[in-house]
Amino acid sequence: MKPDGSDRSVDSWSLKYAWGMADVDRELLLEKITHTGEAAATPVTLPPTTFVYTQLPNRVDKLGENDGPFIKDRLTTVYNESGGQLDVNYTRADCTIIGGGSVIRGAAKKGAEKAAGNSAKKAARTQQETQQKKMSGALEGRADVVVCDPADPGKTITDIDRVQGGVLWEEKSATWATNIDNWVTGHIRNKFNSYMDARKYLPGYEHAPIGWGFATSNVDPELRSAIESEVGRLRQANPDADIRLEWAP
């Protein structure tokens, strides 16, 4: 408040939004908040607080069902105005494997094994190994495949957007990013690492190619260049991996 009793601006915050695409729905996402101090003669604008999202399923996609996994963007990283980073970890999906037309859920499996004793655990492991062998190649044409760690049923490694032609595809619709470095780190580098880890548990796909498919060619040139540069770096660092990148015509 000014000496004369009138109000004056002290602080202001501007918010920037963007329409994202998750599953089949559009989502309004908060991308950044910029804080400006206005008490001084010359306003001071701080670096923006930016937000990074990761698409995650909200239900397990069971074979034979017509319902999808209900993919939605979830906030996973916040970069604040002072240079700090906050990462958000979500409770992992309760599942073990997808195959044979069903999803084996971790909690039910653990409860049954505890009641049955050690011999039942051994039988369950043998049955799971047999089921995994039958799965070889069975994911062809599947979309939104949730991969969990058999050693830790509550841990979701990643969700694979599409399995086509023996390739594990990560599908993207982004055309620009507020923070390109952060976007590339989360959606290319980190996603590649999770796909590499996940394919170990997919019989028949242990050495499958990993690819990114972009739904539009109308991508910001700077973002596209950064993506191609990172994919090139991954190819150089992982010469034994078949890494693919496709842009829509």
Image (cartoon, rainbow, N blue to C red):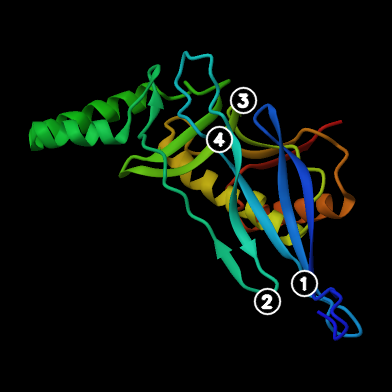
Helix, strand or loop under label 2: loop
Q: CA distance from mark 1 to mark 2?
A: 7 Å
In this view, which residue lies farthest toward the front?
Answer: 5
Q: Mark 2, residues whose alpha carbon is within 10 Å: few (<14), some, or many (≥20)?
A: few
11 relative to 21, above or below: below
In percent of the image, x 66 and y 54: which residue is there?
Answer: 52
Point 70% across, 72% down: residue: 81
User: Residue 82 bears which disc, if any?
Assistant: 2
Position of residue 62 in the picture relative to residue 38 (left or right): left
Image height of 200 relative to 85, above or below: above
Q: Are marks 1 and 4 in contact (CB under 8 Å)?
A: no
Q: Nearer the viewer, residue 77 or 125?
A: 77
User: What's the amino acid at mark 1?
Assistant: Pro
Relative image position of residue 118 (x, y in whole percent): 9, 38
Residue 3, horizontal then vertical, whole percent:
85, 86
Residue matched to label 1: 47
Disc 4 crowd, CA 10 A, few/some/many (<14, 14-19, 20+): many
Query: Which residue bears the numbered disc 3?
Result: 164
Q: Horizontal and vertical percent for residue 122?
A: 15, 34
Mark found first going from the N terminus, 1 or 4: 1
163 and 147: which is toward the camera = 147
In the rendered view, would you say 179 is above or below 111?
Answer: below
Query: In whole angstroms, how far apart are the C-alphas of marks 3 and 2?
Result: 43 Å
Q: Of circles 3 and 2, which is in front?
A: 2
Q: Earlier in the sequence, mark 3 or mark 1?
A: 1
Circle 1 sits in a helix, a strand or a loop, which is it?
loop
Residue type for callout 2:
Ser
Residue 183 sits in quarter: bottom right
Quickly name the residue at label 4.
Answer: 160
Q: Residue at the location (64% across, 49% down)?
A: 53
Residue 228 appearing in the image = no
